[in-house]
Image (cartoon, rainbow, N blue to C red):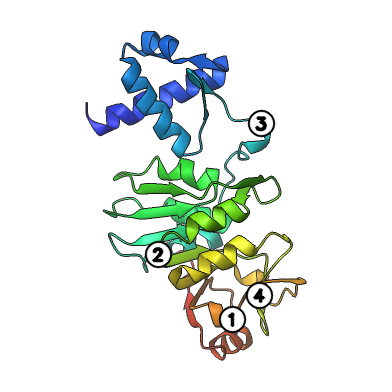
Amino acid sequence: MPKRDTAQRRHAILAYVNAHGETPVEVLASRFAISEVTVRKDLSSLESSGLLLRRYGGAAPLPQEMLAEPAQVLSPHKRAIARAARARIREHNRIIVDSGTTTAALIGELGGLRGLVVMTNSLAVAGALRELEPEPALLMTGGTWDPHSESFQGQVAEQVLRAYDFDQLFVGADGIDLDRGTTTYNELFGLTRVMAEVAREVVVMVEADKLGRRIPNLELPWARIDTLVTDWRLEAADAAAIEAQGVTLVVADAPQ
């Protein structure tokens, strides 16, 4: 069966389970006129993408607290940053995309890239990756669900990450302390530091209006950051301060 047909069937199965609740394999097999073996493969794929939960003999929808918020309209700044970050990715790269709205904007720019392997701790990112053509190989960290960041965190996620190595990490920030590095309101930032450990290039994607925010929690010090991608509103003094840290600075162009 063509890949596109398989993807459409899996989307239909997901919609059915979300609408009807916990559903046995045999019901899905009958409903979609496929074998139970095929149903189990589809359910395994959907679960690995973080879209539903397997149950003995069937599947169930994700709990409400694990569902991502409806997609928001992206600002022109986020879209421009995503395009500039995309230009740094080559086919067959192995990348990590951390949770966050700015990093999630990157996914929509990845269509057409062949051979990508993408690890994420975000259900929203995982779901968006499933829509791409060609579809990247998707890896999920697993771990403990954190409703504040809407992502998986914790020691299990850290152990999974340390089993791999990656070309690039794409990560956002709540703020940029020009003296220290990226800062965050979330106290669960250990996983981001592990992501940086296992990536050859750490790329921070952040809107210019977050520069200078001195939030108490230091997430990544400048020594762990290779590249910072921001938008055209960047002030000259801030640019000089970032480059003085030895970080490659990429400024996204304003839309024409």
User: Mark 3 to mark 4: distance in Å?
Assistant: 34 Å
Which residue, given by chain and number where applicable, does mark 1 sit on? 222
Residue under label 4, please give it.
211
The amino acid at mark 2 is Phe
Which residue corresponds to mark 2? 166
Q: How dense is the environment of label 4, judged by Cα within 10 Å: few (below 14), some, or many (20 and up)?
A: many
Comes first in the chain, label 1 or label 2: 2
Q: Earlier in the sequence, mark 2 or mark 3?
A: 3
Q: Residues within 10 Å of mark 1 (few under 14, many from 20)?
A: some
Whether residue 178 is visible to the viewer of this picture, yes or no, is yes
Q: Indicate the position of residue 140 as horizontal and vertical percent values.
A: 48, 47
* Residue wearing tag 3: 64
Residue 248 or residue 192, whichever sits in front: 192
Spatial separation of the CA atoms under disc 1 and disc 2: 19 Å
Q: Nearer the viewer, mark 1 or mark 2?
A: 2
Residue 46 placed where, x, y %? 44, 32
Looking at numbered disc 3 in the image, what kind of residue is underneath it? Gln
Give the CA distance from mark 3 to mark 1.
Answer: 37 Å
Give the residue drawn at x 46%, y 67%: 198
